[in-house]
Image (cartoon, rainbow, N blue to C red):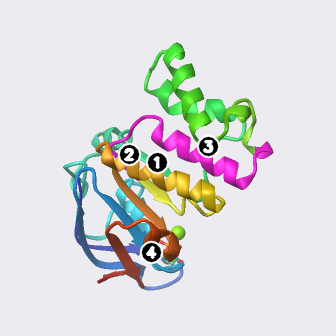
Amino acid sequence: MVRFEHVGLSYPAPGRRSAAAVLHDVSFRVPEGGFRWLLGTSGAGKTSLLRLMYLAIRPTEGRLSVLETDITSARRGMLANLRRRIGVVFQDFRLLPHLSAFDNVALPLRIAGRSEGQIRADVAEMLRWVGLAGKLESPPETLSGGEQQRVAIARAVITRPRLLLADEPTGNLDEAQAERLMRLLQELSRLGTTVVVATHNEALASRHGAPALRLEHGRLVP
Ligand SMILES: Nc1ncnc2c1ncn2[C@@H]1O[C@H](COP(=O)(O)OP(=O)(O)O)[C@@H](O)[C@H]1O
Ligand SMILES: [Mg+2]
């Protein structure tokens, strides 16, 4: 499902002679339907590793395949196709400010050409599930951080992606909401979605036993 082989990543460093290396010799696999924590302190490289997995950037070294496709050699059209099967919960939510909570979550379904009748039922149910049944028409700026995070989560899972990537998805949630979200993510993985969740919250990860990928200074450590 996801395979990293000796992947390295450097960001261009303007004004410096050499690029800034943030990931070094990263190798791992996640099988279909697997659940992995991605752990590490701030700056360890978690977000960069997720960005590689959702195909926002390409590795500067090594090979990477996602959804059985070798990204290192894939063409642009192919990448766009793959991205549609990957759900992402961004750390900064990235909700569209001029759309209501409902329309933010409905957007990926509309892009996929689903019927409005089906969209109405699916989106309302999903927003009810994340505890936002009363906020369907609210624009993001009127929602709390935790509410916006739950809209972002609903939007990422509404299309039933094959691969779900979440970057610190519990950062703005209280403990009960975080536990609920973890149950949802584990349920999705049981149903066959491959899930990778980045967090610096070791306590949360240890409460939900699952294999962990642990980054330190851009390297995977045991
Ligand atoms: N776009 C970028 N350009 C240059 N350096 C970056 C960029 N994004 C992240 N970095 C650097 O890469 C390192 C890892 O960052 P990041 O992947 O965001 O880690 P984490 O998510 O674990 O906090 C940090 O040193 C950060 O400053
Ligand atoms: Mg990060």
Q: Position of residue 90 (x, y in %)?
A: 54, 55
Mark 1, secondary structure of its residue: helix
Disc 4 versus disc 3: distance between alpha carbons?
25 Å
Q: Magenta part of the protein: which range?
A: 141-164
Residue corresponding to mark 3: 151
Q: Residue at x 61, y 52 (%)?
A: 93
Question: Given the image, on which type of amino acid does mark 3 rest?
Answer: Val
Picture disc at residue 188: 2
User: Closer to the N terminus: mark 2 or mark 4?
Assistant: 4
Disc 4 versus disc 1: distance between alpha carbons?
25 Å
Q: Residue at x 49, y 84 (%)?
A: 16
Q: Residue at x 46, y 69 (%)?
A: 207
Disc 2 versus disc 3: distance between alpha carbons?
17 Å
Q: Residues within 10 Å of mark 1 (few under 14, many from 20)?
A: some
Q: Foreground mark, 1 or 3?
A: 1
Disc 2 versus disc 4: distance between alpha carbons?
25 Å
Tell me if residue 151 comes above or below residue 42 in the rendering.
Answer: above
Picture disc at residue 45: 4
Question: Given the image, on which type of amino acid does mark 2 rest?
Answer: Leu
Label 4 near ligand 1 (CB < 8 Å): yes
| Left or right of residue 48: residue 155 | right
Q: Residues within 10 Å of mark 4 (few under 14, many from 20)?
A: many
Question: Given the image, on which type of amino acid does mark 1 rest?
Answer: Leu
Mark 2, secondary structure of its residue: helix
